[in-house]
Structures are given as structure tokens and as C-alpha cells.
Amino acid sequence: TPRTARTPVTNAQYGEYLKANPGVQKPPFWGDRRYNLPVQPVVGVSWQDAKAYCEWAGLSLPTEAQWEYACRARTTTAYYSGDGEADLARVGWYSDNSGERLHAAGELEPNRHGLYDMHGNVLEWCRDAFWGDTTTPRAGDGLRHEPEGAALRVMRGGCFLDDAAEARSASRHALMPGARMYIVGFRPARARP
């Protein structure tokens, strides 16, 4: 069973965090009607913001290996639903079916683990720094590269503006850890004891 949340963190969930932590800066798109519905994934959070939320909630950002394990759900196909674009359209919001807009979390079919939106809707921060993916994941949590300093961070899953190839289970993206973009959110994992 995967250790990750069923959906990316929603605005409603992030709002609870903001209420409990009044000194935390609101995401830059918090007041934008296109991105601030309670059921939509929160966007505009930096890697540091996502990490701070996870720590507050007693969780952690998933490593890239944890994220891919959770996404694939024991499949070897391009998407957990199959290899074709029709398979992706059943489970993920991407450029050809999203209407170029963010959707509510959990609207499409989940994978075998009961996880929604692993393909598309928002890119999701992972704990790892972005380097080659040929490094053997370390035992326990699967971390490949320690997230230090300003090193690029891994994002997975594709977003509502990406084409089908960018939403594959194996597709990798990178961004500076301080970036706050309207296509990036996150999904917590249970912290290891």
C-alpha cells in the first residue's frame, strides 16, 4: 500500500494550515478565481512551502521513488490506466482534455491504490534534488539525491497544460525550489517512523 495522500493538497486543506499559521505567506494565486476553489489542488506553493506544510501535518514530501511507486500501482504501462491517450483521458487532466484549466481534485478514475490525479492536473513536488535518475534509490525511502541549497527539485505527474507524454508515470520535471507557479502543487506522504 502506498504511503501517499489520495489527492494533491486542496485549497481547503491548505487554508486550514494558513489559519493555524497566520505568519505564513499565502500562495500568489490564492485570490484568483481560476485557482482558489476549495476542491482544487493548491497551486503557487514553493518546494519550501510544501515541505513546511508536510512537517506541520506530521507528513513529508514523497521521494521521487515513492511517488512513482504510488503512481504506477503495480503497472508497467505509460499511465496506470494503460498506454494510450484514451487511457490517460480517463484518469488525468492534460492539454487535450483539461480546457486549459485547473480541475477539482479527484474527479477522474483513481489507480488501484485509490489515488487520484497522479497524471496531470498539477505537477507535484518530490523531496529529491533533480539529477540523473540512474542513481540507485537508497534503502528505506528511495531518496536518490539530497535536496540541498538551490539545487533544482523533482516534480512528477504532469499538469493540465502538458501534453500526454509529459504526464507519463516516468516523466520527470525540474524547478527551482523557491518557484511558485500556477501549475505546481504537492501530495504528502506519511513520514517514516
Image: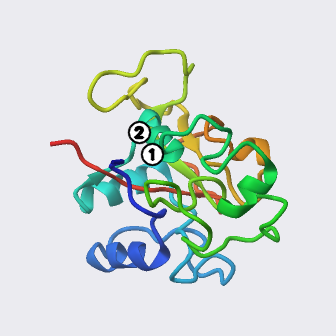
Q: Quadrant of residue 143 in the image? A: top left
Helix, strand or loop at label 2? It is helix
Image mark count: 2
Colour pattern: rainbow
In the displayed structure, 142 sits above or below 97; it is: above
* Residue 163 visible in the shown view: no
Q: Position of residue 118 (x, y in %)?
A: 56, 54
Q: Amino acid at mark 1?
A: Ala
Residue visible at 36% across and 48% down in the picture: 2
Q: Position of residue 110 (x, y in %)?
A: 54, 62
Q: Is residue 178 left or right of residue 82?
A: left
Q: Position of residue 17 (x, y in %)?
A: 33, 72
* Residue 57 visible in the shown view: yes
State the residue in front, 24 or 1. 1
Of circles 1 and 2, which is in front? 1
Residue visible at 59% across and 82% down in the picture: 31
Proximity of marks 1 and 2: CB atoms separated by less than 8 Å: yes
Q: Is residue 16 left or right of residue 56?
A: right
Residue visible at 45% across and 66% down in the picture: 9
Q: Disc number at residue 66?
A: 2
Q: Disc number at residue 84?
A: none
State the residue in front, 98 or 91. 91
Q: Which residue is mark 1?
A: 70
